[in-house]
Structures are given as C-alpha cells and as structure tokens.
Amino acid sequence: MVDNLDTDTIQRLKIEVAQAALKYVRPDTVLGVGSGSTVNAFIDALTAAQIPLKGAVAASLESERRLKSAGIEVLDFNWVDSLDIYIDGADETTDFLCLTKGGGAALTREKILATAARQFICMVDIRKRVNRLGAFPIPVEVIPFARSYVARKLIGLGGQPTWRQGVFTDNGNVILDVKGLDIVDPFALESAIEALPGVVCCGIFAKRRADIALISSEKGIDTLLAQPILK
Ligand code: 5RP
C-alpha cells in the first residue's frame, strides 16, 4: 500500500486509469457506470472520446446527473435486459480482484450492476492495492430500523461499526463503516454479513469480484486479470 502521494499526483493517477478504461468501452453497447471521483474522471474521458453508446446505466444519482449533463443517455435499469460492461472504482483491491466498495455510499446499486454485467472493469490507483481487505473500513448498507441490531451483530463478527451519521444512500438507507474485521476469507464474511436481517448490502465484493483491475501508478498502468481462487 502506497500512501505518500500528493493530491495532484493522486488526481493525475485517477485521470490516467480512467483513460485506460476507455479501451474497454465498445460502441453501440449499454455501459454500466459506477460512482466516485475516479468514475467522475472516467465520465469526463468518455465525454471527450465521443464513443457512441446505446446508453448508460448509473450506480448513483450523482453519476446519473454527470452522465446526463455530458449528453449521455441514461437508461432505467429496469428496461435494460443485458449489460455488456460495468466500469467502477473501488476503495481497495487484492490481486485476486476482491474489492472493498462503498466509500461513496453507492455500494448496493454498484453490486447490482457489477453482478448483472458480463464484464466488470475496476479502476484504482496504486494506493488501493492491498494484500488483504480491511484496512479501509467495510461499508455496510442497513435499513434504518435495524441499525443498532445490525451494529451489535457486526460486533459479534469481530468488527467495530461506526454509523456514518447524516448520510443516507440513494435507497434511503444508512451506512455502518466496520473497522477491525479479520478478512481471511472475504467470500465467507460477505455472505455472513449479507445474511443478517436488516443488511441490504456489504461492501465486500468477493462473490462478484472484478474481472479486470486497472491499477495506475507512477510506473504506468498495470492490468490484472481475475485468476481462479483455490480454496
Ligand atoms: C462508491 C465507491 C467508489 O467506487 C469508491 O469509494 C472509490 O471512490 P473514489 O474513486 O472516489 O476513490 O465504491 O460507493
């Protein structure tokens, strides 16, 4: 993990990885678009590239607003029967392309689109490449009614949840950020958290990890392909 990059360098790395993702966008397809600052850089690159699309489906209201103001048609996901590619950022990635997502509170729609898409391309800068998930607290989207109950259950799983006060997701729910989890098996933990009544979505993306991770650094772009995980 690299954490000594200055703000300008980080922004440049986001722009470079967003540019690199453009080559996966094929004309006349429906594109799934995630959310966050790297995705904002991607929307800028997409706008400049003028690739003709059938349309885009957005994982957040903010991405929807940005796509529309760039003149890109935004489709209602309920009317889209197949999604070719989903492009998004992440808060952490392992080399097996298991991710932490949800820093921007859009994890549920992101997981739906990533799972629906044939191919999931993840764009990160080198600060986010980790050996094991968990340094970034795991966001969990929870129905407000169940916030305290779910928090107690997350403590039971070994975590220290903090309520992201004042934040409501696009679905009207709240976020608990969970520190201290020992994520040896991201699949098992994702399943255990998502099995808790009241949990809408866990920010671990292991059951639907990325197919390709593009990782920008001062040395250029590294392209990692998902490898089989042997258990
Ligand atoms: C939003 C996300 C984002 O992809 C993640 O937080 C990374 O954001 P950024 O590109 O701003 O660092 O999961 O819910």
Image (cartoon, rainbow, N blue to C red):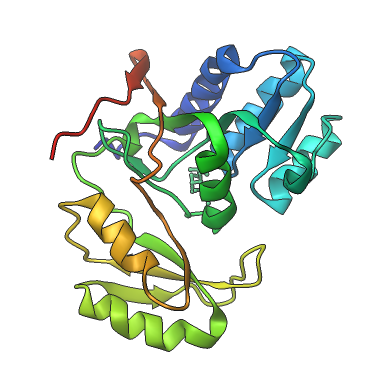
User: What residue is at 42 percent from the left and 32 percent from the top?
Assistant: 124
Give coordinates of residue 72: x percent, y percent. Answer: 82, 30
Give coordinates of residue 32: x percent, y percent. Answer: 64, 34
User: What residue is at 59 percent from the left and 76 percent from the top?
Assistant: 166
Pick whichever, 163 or 1, lies toward us: 163
User: What residue is at 33 percent from the left and 21 percent from the top?
Assistant: 225
Quadrant location of the N terminus?
Answer: top left
Determine the image quadrant of residue 117.
top right
Pick whichever, 42 or 2, lies toward us: 42
Q: Is residue 5 left or right of residue 227?
A: right
Give coordinates of residue 15: x percent, y percent. Answer: 55, 24
Decide: is 59 above or below 203. above
Q: Is residue 175 left or right of residue 26?
A: left
Residue 134 makes an appearance in the image? no
Quadrant location of the C terminus?
Answer: top left
Pick whichever, 217 or 143, lies toward us: 143
Q: Is residue 145 left or right of residue 181?
A: right
In the current view of this chain or complex, which residue is farthest to the front? 81
Decide: is 123 above or below 78. above
User: What residue is at 22 percent from the left and 64 percent from the top?
Assistant: 181
Pick whichever, 56 or 197, lies toward us: 197
Residue 102 makes an appearance in the image? yes
Decide: is 162 above or below 105. below
Give coordinates of residue 201: x percent, y percent. Answer: 47, 62
What is the count of numbered marks? 0
